[in-house]
Image (cartoon, grey):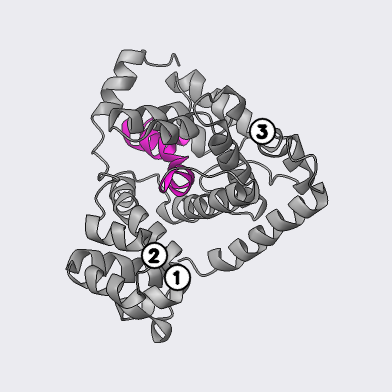
Amino acid sequence: MNPPSDFLLIERINQCPKLASLESINETLANLLDSEDSFVGQIAEVIRLDPSLTTRVLDLVNSIFFGSKEDHHITGVEEASIFLGLNRIRELIAATPIIEEISALGKKSEHFSWESFWRHSIGTAILTREILSIADHKVEQEADYVAGLLHNLGILILAITFPEIFPHVYGKSHQSLEELTTKEVSLVGWDHAKMGAYYLWNHHISEEVVEAVHWHNHPLKATVNPKLAAAVQLAEFLVRHLKVKGLEKFPDPEKEELHTLEGWNILFSDHQEDDPEIINERIFSSVERLGQTLQTII
């Protein structure tokens, strides 16, 4: 089977429904979240002004942290804000419009396992932020969380735009990520990272997020913010190490392989004064916490 031309590929991707704008957060709420003088009550009041936003926050909080245990559900916005803390509220509010749109897209494909994709994506988003914090590297706004969340968006795009090809890639087992992406290129012409990056670029998502999605499997090729792409690579590897693979079928990575990844050298090669064991300990402490969080996601 010959892959389609780039022109057909681009035409099909362009026909995918649009994602919600990443700037859909209420400006007043964003300002409150960025202010050191804000109180949880103030933030909750702003959230309550928007019934749709209130529903999104409560639904997302409960689905992530309490699964289907209805007797433990949080019903108040202020309670949710106190429980999560301001940073997590900021992350969730930034991410919910995107999550909703991706979920809606996923339902358009009969081959797509939304739950697996969601668990892997949210895990990578959380760990991307944790890893960049350990590496002492800051990014603009929510770029770390959003890049981690959207890194495998191209898999969903492939499921929607080429439903006849999708099962031939994601319905089969592969020995490695490289083998899987090689199969994508041979059948489609692009791998999922490039498809996701093109889709985001075409919808005016920030350059560093687009680049991180494009090169999360090969962060040495990134030029705008290689450390962001590197963090996504490490985060995805570690989420797979937790056996939260998403849709891909290949062997679980070994813990020792982490230090062989391009992303490790990009982020930590200049930390000569830091004990590698301490860095390792901090990273795997974050991984352990994430594992506990992901167990509650439905």
Q: Secondary structure at mark 1?
A: loop
Q: Is residue 146 magenta?
A: yes
Tag 2, which secondary structure? Answer: helix
In three-dimensional space, the C-alpha distance between marks 1 and 2, rounded to whole angstroms, equals 6 Å
Q: Which residues are magenta?
A: 141-168
Few, some or many C-alpha atoms within 10 Å of disc 1 (few <14, some 14-19, many ≥20)? Answer: few
Above or below residue 130? Residue 292 is: below
Whether 107 is among the magenta residues is: no
Image quarter (top left, top right, bottom left or bottom right) of the N terminus: top left
Q: Which mark is residue 266?
A: 3
Q: Secondary structure at mark 3?
A: helix
Crowdedness near tag 2: few (<14), some (14–19) or many (≥20) residues, C-alpha within 10 Å: some
Across and down, in percent, residue 84 comes to 44, 71
Q: Which residue is mark 1?
A: 85
Residue 26 showing in the rendered view: no
* Residue tagged 2: 89
**Marks 1 and 3, the one that precedes in the sequence:** 1
What percent of the width, then of the height, locates residue 285?
69, 61
Label 1–label 2 contact, CB within 8 A: yes
Give the amino acid at mark 1: Gly
Question: Which residue is found at the position 25% from the left and 45% from the top?
Answer: 20
How far apart, in angstroms, are the residues tagged by discs 2 and 3? 30 Å
Mark closer to the chain start, 2 or 3? 2
Depth order, front residue of 247/262? 262
Magenta highlight: main SS? helix
Question: x, y percentage for residue 288?
Answer: 67, 63
Which percent across, then down, holds residue 188?
43, 22
Q: Amino acid at mark 3?
A: Ile
Horizontal side, residue 277 vs residue 54: left or right: right
